[in-house]
Amino acid sequence: MYCNNCGLIVDQEDFFCSGCGKRIKNKPDIESSELEIKDFESETSTSRELNFTKSVFFSFNNRKIPTYRCIFKGIWIVVLICVLGTLLTAYSTFALGSNESPAVNSPIPQGRIQTDKNIRLCEQIATEYSSSHTYSKDDVYDCDNMAQDVWNMLKAKGINARISVGNFESAGGSRIANAKTVHKSPDSGNLGEIEVPSRTYSNMNVSNSSTIDGFNHAWVLAEVSPDSWLAIECTAGYIVYSDENEKYYQGLTFSNPKNYRSFISLYRDWKIKALDYEKERLYYNELIALYNNASYSEQIVMKSGIEIAQRTLQEKEKAFLKTDSELNALLRYG
């Protein structure tokens, strides 16, 4: 390196000439140098990135690719991603739907499913009970005892039931074939509503008590759905639909065995008091008829007897009316 002023050879690191003392070069500005270095590196990296991008999007095997082809490829990639996303969404929805409970997607109402379940349970209880109990017609273990047992078994399973009594013989073997219960689908059988003789809800008297006197059989009615009942013949172990024998849905019903037993006891007492009151009433009326046809002196003698007969009649009438009121309340509310 030479000095520009005197032409003396100088070292490249010297800032002043050793011959003439002329400044050869200025002191470097460190900060500007650093900035220049950073700008250089930034430009270099940007240039590299641009070159890399160009090499990716505009070259393939060192061959140039037109720009519009790259745009079309990008559009196809976006479309492909959207299609795959739609297919994945549809598959996820189908997979989740298939894992749901069948009862939710089932077109059968939940209430009908529970009704069918209760019917099957009633049929099972009737069959199992009949296979382990013997029906006796000599009042040793008759229909009302069996009805109370089946009522208790139904209540233990959570099915509401009522003990029913009516004036007809058991349906016998109409639902029994070859010693096996003939199964009938609930779809082909009709559940029934309870029908009660209306006149038993009015004031009882001796003449209309023949309705109750005609009752000769007891069975159970199970409420398999709200206000829909299914008859169970306890002595033979089968169920009876209303369209098979409507008599199973007529008569008197009681909400529990205690009320049924109270009815039997109360009705027996009612009949005794009713007959006793009727007998006393006839006797009193005969006395009154004799008194009216007697002479004055005879009436004086008969008057005390008539008064005693009247007090007795009133007492018997009061006892009968009390029992009659209790019986009517039990018949009304079961």
Image (cartoon, rainbow, N blue to C red):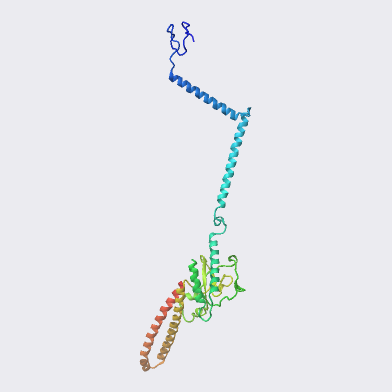
Given residues 139 and 276, the one toward you in this image is 139
Given residues 1 and 168, the one toward you in this image is 1
Residue 234 position, x and y percent, is 53, 73
Please state if 94 lies on the left or on the right of 23 as rendered.
right
Residue 264 seen: yes
* Figure quadrant of residue 300: bottom left
Please state if 129 lies on the left or on the right of 279 as rendered.
right
Given residues 55 and 221, the one toward you in this image is 55
Q: Is residue 310 above or below residue 253?
A: below
Residue 252 seen: no
Residue 165 position, x and y percent, is 51, 75
Residue 240 position, x and y percent, is 57, 71
Q: Is residue 237 above or below residue 288?
A: above
Q: Residue at coordinates 42% horizontally, 76% vertically from top-left?
A: 326
Residue 162 position, x and y percent, is 49, 71
Please state if 53 lies on the left or on the right of 330 as rendered.
right
Q: Residue at coordinates 37% horizontally, 91% vertically from top-left?
A: 302
* Figure quadrant of residue 243: bottom right
Q: How many labels sit on residues?
A: 0
Q: Is residue 101 above or below residue 63?
A: below
Q: Residue at coordinates 54% horizontally, 26% vertically from top-left?
A: 48
* Figure quadrant of residue 74: top right
Given residues 127 and 283, the one toward you in this image is 127
